[in-house]
Image (tube, helix red, strand yellow):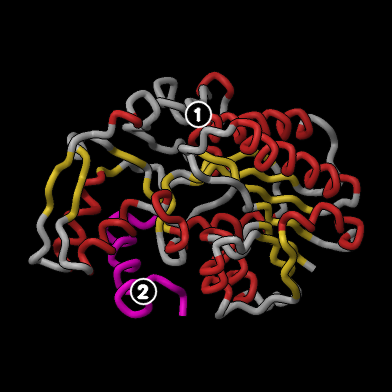
Amino acid sequence: MIIVTGGAGFIGSHIVKSLNDLGHTNIIVVDNLSKPEKHLNLNRLKIADFIDKEDFLQELNHFKQVETIFHEGACSDTMESNGRYMMKNNFEYSKELLSFALTNKINFLYASSASVYGNGEKGFTEDLSCEYPLNIYAYSKFLFDQHVRDILKSHLSSQVLGLRYFNVYGPQENHKGRMASVAFHLMTAAAKGESLKLFEGSKGFRRDFIYVDDVVAVNQFFFENKKSGIFNCGSGHAQSFQDIANTIKTLIPETQIETVPFPAALVGKYQTFTEANINALREAGYTKPFQTVEEGVKRYFDVFQKTGGYVS
């Protein structure tokens, strides 16, 4: 049996699909469907059961025979200002689940975040000297990573693996609202015949955009080889927001691109540059190439046109 928390979410639902593709169907999805449209992410997936995230921790003792937990569930709203909620949801919940996994020798793969690197002035290598979170979301991820690092110093009888996701985009993020990727928002605008709005300076804002299929491939690699550690999960190559808009314009030539003022609320809280150092990932044995923005956005656009952004 495999558990995927956040399994109705963006990355979590893709992980469930990848497990189905490997022949796994005895999967428990843990999530919160207060946004009921998230069920659309599960429509084409085969699972054994669904459990609400609020009930899950109370029922943990029923799952001692689980082989692997993919812990993808979290509050991912980087603008959330309720620190108490964020720490309880992302840090305390994760600690309790990891403790259960270690006690019962269950492999534990979890989602961390590149936000732990803050403005990135010290680089993007999996080292404490590079890490300085700028908001409470990033801090919740940062603190759990530190907790995991302490545990990794011990001899473990099960796998503990954290992946620091950079800017992930792709199908099945429709429910994320304002936290959906720039690619999603720009494609949605283009589909409505609207102009593609970019913040002033977007040509100089470069992020490590990684297509969701590549994120799944990295998860699958570690699921199969059982290595432990904390690794960056990015393409290793930064591209601009302008590149995304330009790619969409090649697909819908009549689309116009315009710039809008940079929001005051994001000043000092916005990563203008990210680029994963993937040396550790490569040294761990992951050799597959990563898709460029041009390749990934075209694949995403194809799905978006056919299904509105859902895996069929």
| Disc 2 target residue | 308
Pick whichever, 74 or 209, lies toward us.
74
Q: Is residue 175 visible?
A: yes
- As drawn, the label of residue 101 is none
Quadrant in which residue 30 is drawn: bottom right
Residue 293 on image: x %, y %: 30, 54
Amino acid type at circle 1 is Asn
Q: Residue at x 46, y 56 (%)?
A: 176
Question: What amino acid is found at the position of numbered circle 2 in the picture?
Answer: Gly
Magenta stretch: give its range: 290-312
Say whether residue 298 is left or right of residue 73. Answer: left
Q: Is residue 254 above or below residue 139?
A: below
Q: CA distance from mark 1 to mark 2?
A: 32 Å
Q: Main secondary structure of the magenta part?
A: helix
| Residue under numbered circle 1 | 135
Q: Residue at x 79, y 57 (%)?
A: 56
What residue lies at 60% left-to-right and 35% top-to-bottom?
A: 141
Depicted 10 relative to depicted 305: above or below: above
144 sits left or right of 218 in the view:
right
Secondary structure category for the residue under label 1 = loop
- Vertical placement of residue 120 versus 307, above or below: above
